[in-house]
Image (cartoon, rainbow, N blue to C red):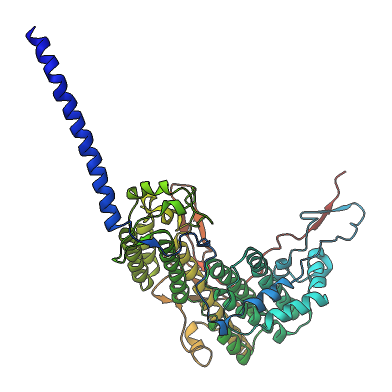
Amino acid sequence: MVKAHRSRSERPIRRHLLRACSVLFHALVAAGVVYLAITRWNGVPADPIRPTQSTLVYSPPLDPALDRTEELLAALGALPSAPALTLPPAPPGMQWTGRVSGAVYVVDACCGEWTPETRPNLQGVIAFLETPETIAALSRVTSIEPGGWRPFGSTGAGSTALRGMGQAPKLLVARARYHHAHRGDVDAALGDLAAAYRFAAAIFDSGAWLGLTGAAGCQVLADHELQCLARECELTRTQAARMSNIVCGTTLDRATMWRTATAIQLAELERIIDAGWTDDGYGNGWLVLSHLNSTWQPDWTSSPRVGAWNMLSPFFNDRRTVRGKVALLREVYESAADLPYREAMSVLEAVESPRMFNLTDGPLSLSLMFPISNMCRRSVSTSASRRATIVALALSAYRHDHGEYPVSLEELLNGYLDVIPMDPYADDVLRYRRQGAEFVLYSVGPNGADDGGKKYSVDQTIGRPKPYGDWVYTPSRRDPRFEPTLEPAEQ
């Protein structure tokens, strides 16, 4: 009886405790809401429903006086498409093999021996380059005045720009070889390559990731053709100096590319923060989930969702926290700019490996879609190619004057080079040696070790891929990729 009486007396106490806990819980929730409202929820996003673009195509503003967007897009839009490949009848008992259909592959004109009589694809390239439409279109591209452009503001303009960025440099370098190999006009060939370098500088000034990568690809393509031309045609000292000045004028060196790439990256991060987080006037704010789409892409919906989504905002980092991460990233980028290549890569990979931004950072978690270390690699390799081209031009002029290549690069300092270009992969000059009647010119490459001029490759047989070998710039023509060949017909 005593136990039953005690049990009945404890029930009201338990109910009171539960009620008190419930009241305390709701009071804490209410206090939290009030706290958030006072400290973080009393601001508004800069422009939360503004349609934006991804990191790939974001471009900073451009001075209208230097804007060549419309002019360059019109020139790129006028570039004709390559015609279909046509093959002559195969001789009796023979058949065409390899790539026997599709469009003419223009860049194959820069490969292999110049023997149009046995290369149907090369015949197609020559015919394409000689059409009035191609001549007029390339004339428009080469006449663009220096300036910048912002081609990725709309889908239509962006597609035209992408197509032209890939097609124009291939046509220019193919026509350069056509001029010196088919017509014997070296000056016209150098003019085409000069136009390719100017085009690289123009698309680099787009201020977008796509412009940076496109410009680097354009310059490397022009570098290789100019190196081959310098070996096949002995350039005069005047011709070599003129082209050297043009190559240097592209500004696609490591420092400029790195500074531009990181500025675009950081500007994109700041833009996302301003568009997605509120600002309470004291440097803080909350993530407005109601204005983000459900897939966490770095773009915003055109209309807001239900405001109840914002009740989840306290689970995400506030404005001050994400801006602190961006500030840390800025410090890393600035420190990496002056470091040797391998040290810079170690610093950048250390930041990227644990992922600077995670899901608690909302749309910033997917903003760094392309690691900035890739741009570091690209900027250094492009700079190495650029410097090797300058040396190749000087070597060609030296051979023109002396009948042979120098024993060492120091001999070029007598009127051919002011200084010997440094290897951006090492704290030393580019490596060179005369080899018979030719030469070997190379950079030590990403592994930082002098492998004696062995061509760069990557060993992927054991564990993590391991690079070995050097970046070799001894000019030689690659084998054609899409040139049909004659073989005996199958019986």
Report if residue 192 is visible in the image. yes
> Is residue 233 in view from this perspective?
no
Residue drawn at (71%, 71%), measured in percent from left and top?
77
Quadrant that contains the N terminus:
top left
47 left or right of 37? right
Image quadrant where one finds the C terminus: top right
Residue 368 place in picture, x, y as percent: 45, 58
Q: Position of residue 482 (x, y in %)?
A: 73, 59
Which residue occupies the extreme top position in the image? Answer: 1
Residue at 71% x, 78% y is 176
Above or below: residue 411 compared with residue 26 = below
Q: Is residue 89 left or right of residue 198?
A: right
Residue at 59% across, 84% down = 146
Q: Nearer the viewer, residue 249 or 179?
A: 249
Which quarter of the picture shows residue 355? bottom left
Q: Nearer the viewer, residue 99 or 56?
A: 56
Image position, residue 104 (x, y; %): 77, 63
